[in-house]
Structures are given as structure tokens and as C-alpha cells.
């Protein structure tokens, strides 16, 4: 008999290198305490439930996104071809939505992991991260790679996305290089402030992505610089040189702001 499973995934905070995960660059990110949590259990009908609202799936057409609370679950179930499955998904998420903290990726990863556990399907973390990202890109919004990888791996990581700037088909993407650096860091003197302002990451990234694809030299130069800032940021983190890291973070932000992406 199938069992019930609980799956959780953290939000993430990009420290330095953003947004070069979309351009074959390097990023340092850390997990947040806030998480998405999903319970999957056997049911007579495929159903989703969140915040007191319920959605039953009786036909594959019911999995079409409509901009509502259930779009992430619909996208994953559709991609996995599980419209005839008999389970319920119930979830909650305390990662702030539309705040740049990967709430949608935390939901995607936790739902995907719950379904894999329920189906007794064993996949490694890189596969899970790539699938979560692929689904989000193709069903929901333009996105990079760090969100799905961070929500899958957790921790404090230096990540290298070389060769991943052209968005290949799911089975053709090279895996990212994930280097955990939290074992070498005795403190994490960060304060994360959320202003409450909400905006779509796709709205921010699409115009600059289009400029990059057209060969805009300024965008190319700036993102090569930001990727280098992340590599220097790794040294600063490992040396506990927080003043230096702060300088690099400010430069990162100023470059992205001047490109119109902040």
C-alpha cells in the first residue's frame, strides 16, 4: 500500500553573482529558514489543496495553468504524465512570494521530491534540480538555474554554471558544479530584509536576456564581470573577509541596476 510522505525545500538568497546563473556564470547563494512543505498521500482522485482551496483533476485538460495557486503542481503532474494518478498533494509555503527568494522553485522541488518518493522513483539531486528548473522555464516563467539547484541542495554553495547559457533540451543540459562552502564558514553575518514589494522575476530578466541573445556587448561585458565578482566573493567568504564581500556585493548590485535589472 502506498504511504504518505512529507517533503520540504528551502528558499534561497543569492549573495553574489546574480544573475549570471542564466549566462554560464558563477553564483554564491545560501538557503533561508523559510520553506515549502508538501504532503502526498493516496486518494481516490488526483487533487491539490493549499490555503483552504482545493482542485480536483478529472481530465488532462484540468492541468492547464490558469495563473492560480495550483499552477506549479499542475505543471509538474502534466510534465510527468500523471493525469490519471490517484494521490492528493497538500502544501504550504512560508517563503515570501514574488520577493526574489525562490518561492516557486521551493514549491517545485518539494512537490517533485514528494511525487518521486510516492512513486519510489530514485533520482540523484542534479537530475531533480534540472527537472524542476526545466518545468518552471517551460510552463511558467523565464528563470536561471541557481534557484532549482539551491532549493534541491540547500546550504551555502558556490555554483558554476559554465556551458548552461543557451538553455538546451532537458536531457542535453550539462549539470552545474555545486561546491558546498558552509563547512568552512564559522559564521554567516547576513541580514535578509524583505520590503514587501512584489514583482515577477520574468519581467525583470526578459528584456536583458533579449539584449544578451542579440549580442549586446555591454550586457556581455557586465555579466562576465559579475561572474568574476562571484569567484572573488568565494575567496572573501572563505577568509571571513566580510568587508571585502560587501564591496563586491555592492558592485554586483550597481552593475545589475545600471542594466535595468534591479
Image: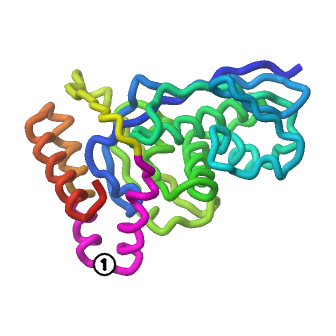
Q: Is residue 26 shown left or right of residue 234?
A: right
Percent of width and height locating residue 71: 66, 44
| Residue 78 drawn above or below residue 30 | below
Percent of width and height locating residue 97: 47, 37
Identify the residue under disc 1. Answer: 216
| Residue 187 drawn above or below residue 181 | above
The mark total stands at 1
Q: Quadrant of the N terminus?
A: top right
Q: Is residue 216 shown left or right of residue 233?
A: right
Would residue 222 be counted in the magenta stretch? Answer: yes
Residue 29, quarter of the rendered image: top left
Mark 1 crowd level (few <14, some 14–19, many ≥20, 10 Å Cα): few
At x 49%, y 37%, the residue is 103
Residue 181, quarter of the rendered image: top left
Q: Secondary structure at mark 1?
A: loop
Region in magenta: 199-225
At x 48%, y 69%, the residue is 166
Percent of width and height locating residue 212: 36, 73
Percent of width and height locating residue 149: 48, 43
| Residue 231 drawn above or below residue 182 | below
Q: Nearer the viewer, residue 127 or 197?
A: 197
Q: Nearer the viewer, residue 65 or 33?
A: 65
At x 32%, y 48%, the residue is 27
Would residue 21 be counted in the magenta stretch? Answer: no
At x 59%, y 25%, the residue is 92
Residue 112, quarter of the rendered image: top right
Q: Is residue 146 shown left or right of residue 156?
A: right
**Magenta stretch: dominant SS?**
helix
Q: Report the colour scheme.
A: rainbow
Amino acid at each position: 500500500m502506498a504511504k504518505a510522505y512529507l517533503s520540504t525545500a528551502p528558499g534561497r538568497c543569492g549573495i553574489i553573482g546574480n544573475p549570471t546563473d542564466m549566462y554560464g556564470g558563477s553564483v554564491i547563494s545560501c538557503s533561508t529558514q523559510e520553506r515549502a512543505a508538501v504532503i502526498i498521500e493516496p486518494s481516490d482522485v488526483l487533487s491539490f489543496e493549499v490555503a483552504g482551496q482545493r482542485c480536483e483533476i478529472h481530465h488532462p485538460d484540468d492541468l492547464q495553468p490558469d495563473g492560480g495557486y495550483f499552477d506549479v503542481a499542475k505543471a509538474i503532474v502534466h510534465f510527468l504524465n500523471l493525469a490519471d494518478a490517484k494521490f492528493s498533494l497538500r502544501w504550504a509555503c512560508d517563503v515570501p512570494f514574488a520577493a526574489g527568494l525562490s518561492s516557486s522553485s521551493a514549491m517545485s522541488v518539494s512537490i517533485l521530491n514528494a511525487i518521486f518518493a510516492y512513486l519510489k522513483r530514485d533520482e540523484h539531486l542534479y537530475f531533480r534540480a534540472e527537472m524542476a528548473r526545466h518545468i518552471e522555464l517551460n510552463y511558467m516563467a523565464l528563470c536561471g538555474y541557481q534557484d532549482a539547484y539551491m532549493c534541491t541542495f540547500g546550504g551555502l554553495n558556490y555554483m558554476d554554471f559554465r556551458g548552461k547559457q543557451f538553455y538546451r533540451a532537458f536531457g542535453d543540459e550539462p549539470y552545474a558544479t555545486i561546491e558546498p562552502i558552509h563547512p568552512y564558514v564559522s559564521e554567516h553575518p547576513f541580514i535578509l530584509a524583505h520590503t514587501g514589494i512584489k514583482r515577477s522575476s520574468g519581467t525583470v530578466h526578459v528584456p536583458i536576456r533579449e539584449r544578451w541573445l542579440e549580442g549586446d556587448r555591454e550586457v556581455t561585458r557586465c555579466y562576465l564581470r559579475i561572474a568574476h565578482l562571484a569567484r572573488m566573493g568565494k575567496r572573501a567568504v572563505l577568509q571571513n573577509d566580510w568587508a571585502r564581500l560587501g564591496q563586491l556585493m555592492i558592485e554586483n548590485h550597481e552593475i545589475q541596476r545600471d542594466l535595468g535589472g534591479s
